Image: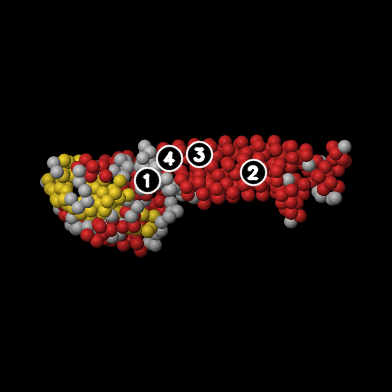
Amino acid sequence: MTVLFLALRSLFLQRRRYVLMFLAIFIGFMLMTVIHSLTSGMLETVKTKAARYFSGHISLTGYEAGQPSLVDVAGLRTSLLDAGLPLRTIAPRTIYYRSDASLFFAGESIRQRRLLGIDFKLEAAEMANLSFLDGSIQDMVTAGQDGILISEAAARLLGARVGDDIILYLTTDSGQYNSSTLIIRGIFRETSLFGYVAYMRQQDLNRMLQRPADAATDLALYTRQGVDPEALLERIRPLLITYRRLLPRLPTKASLYEALAVTDWGQGPVLAILTLQAHLNQITIMLDAFWTVTWFILAVFILVVMVGILNTYRVLVYERTREIGTLRALGMQRAAVQALFLVEATVLALLASVTGFLVGSLVLAGLSRFDVSALPGTGLIADRGHLQPFIDWRLTGLTLTMMIGAVVLAASGPARQASRVTPAEALRTAD
């Protein structure tokens, strides 16, 4: 307690000497808070968009005779619900994977990358963040029969608006051409990576494909906040291994196609389980590279701070030689002198880091208010035109630990030097 009191007293009385060190730590931690939170927010935004597109954070896709078809959807969903897994939504989907789906309106047409037939009541919360230019998810929940949601790009090319009748063309499972007139219930804005997709009721899509109304190709699993899909997958697989023939662990989408190519369909249908990371393998590589850059920047900041702390404390130890000698003459042990400087460094690093975090949070709040939709490439990482910073408390705690550890490590050398000062040496220095 005495060492802590002396350290706080020294920091207060000699605060001018510590200003530069405080600013260096403050700026470093503030910038890392902003960079890490923006990067985490971008990643979460990409995951949210991809989860809508790829059927949740974990997708279960059934295949029968090589074609997407999920057997006993209700039983599979009940098994997962009864397991008490950390999932917030479990919803069946019918996905049209063929590339010939087209929209027709006023003599214009446009191909769709995929059609997503979903249960809007089950997935209303997951679809709520879809960026609508006109219309809403609620329109599909309350009056969604024979309705469709199309992208801004499709609406612009077709010249269509909400309320217009549009013709959807596709091919049934038996290879017959089929079409249906649907009402545009909403127009949404989406990046091209997840664009050229249309959402409609699962029952309507099944009817067009001439399938039973409750048929599905996928089961979308949305995890709760903070749950790692990769770890959760290890809990899900044992639940399904007796229920359905499972394909092996699939790290990428390419591995799915390879597994399907060698599957013996004579043994019955199979079930494939993919996490969002497998779907986003290429994007994940890019984001991992970005994270590597941010950690490199953090390492550079910490190195600069350590050099500054080391040089500043060397000067401080020299200037405080008489003070140290007096404390030693009063009976303070060498270990206590060393601890005094280390506690000073720890408190200084903690105060500067907390201040940097608070200011960084204010900066993030300001950045999130700006509309960045006009900037190229921001459609992928922005939600409805705005960046969505996400403060990862585990990452913040790790950064804080690294910053304090670096400061204490830099101060340890001068602290040992200070502990070797004797009263006699202090008197000679004073003279």
Q: Quadrant of residue 414?
A: top right
Q: Three-letter amino acid code at disc 3? A: Thr
Taking 27 as reference, is 412 left or right? right
The answer to the question of whether label 2 and label 1 lie on touching residues, with beta carbons closer than 8 A, is no
Which residue does the image show at 26% across and 44% down from the upper left? 152
What residue sits right under mark 4 in the picture?
Answer: 287
Residue 335 picture location, percent across and down: 77, 47
Which callout, 2 or 1, points at the residue further toward the start of the chain? 2
Relative to 326, say whether 143 is above or below. below
Which callout, 4 or 1, points at the residue further toward the start of the chain? 4
- SS for callout 3: helix
The answer to the question of whether label 2 and label 4 lie on touching residues, with beta carbons closer than 8 A, is no
Which residue does the image show at 66% across and 47% down from the upper left? 348
Q: Three-letter amino acid code at disc 4? A: Leu
**Residue 134 visible in the current orientation:** yes
Which callout, 2 or 4, points at the residue further toward the start of the chain? 2
Which callout, 1 or 3, points at the residue further toward the start of the chain? 3
Residue 37 picture location, percent across and down: 48, 46
**Residue 259 visible in the current orientation:** no
Taking 260 as reference, is 402 left or right? right
What residue sits right under mark 2 in the picture?
Answer: 22
- SS for callout 1: loop
Q: Number of numbered discs present?
A: 4
Q: Three-letter amino acid code at disc 2? A: Phe
Q: Quadrant of residue 325?
A: top right
Q: Three-letter amino acid code at disc 1? A: Gly
What residue sits right under mark 3 in the picture?
Answer: 294
Q: How crowded is the residue under tag 1: few (<14 C-alpha within 10 Å), some, or many (20+)? A: many
Which dot marks residue 385? 1
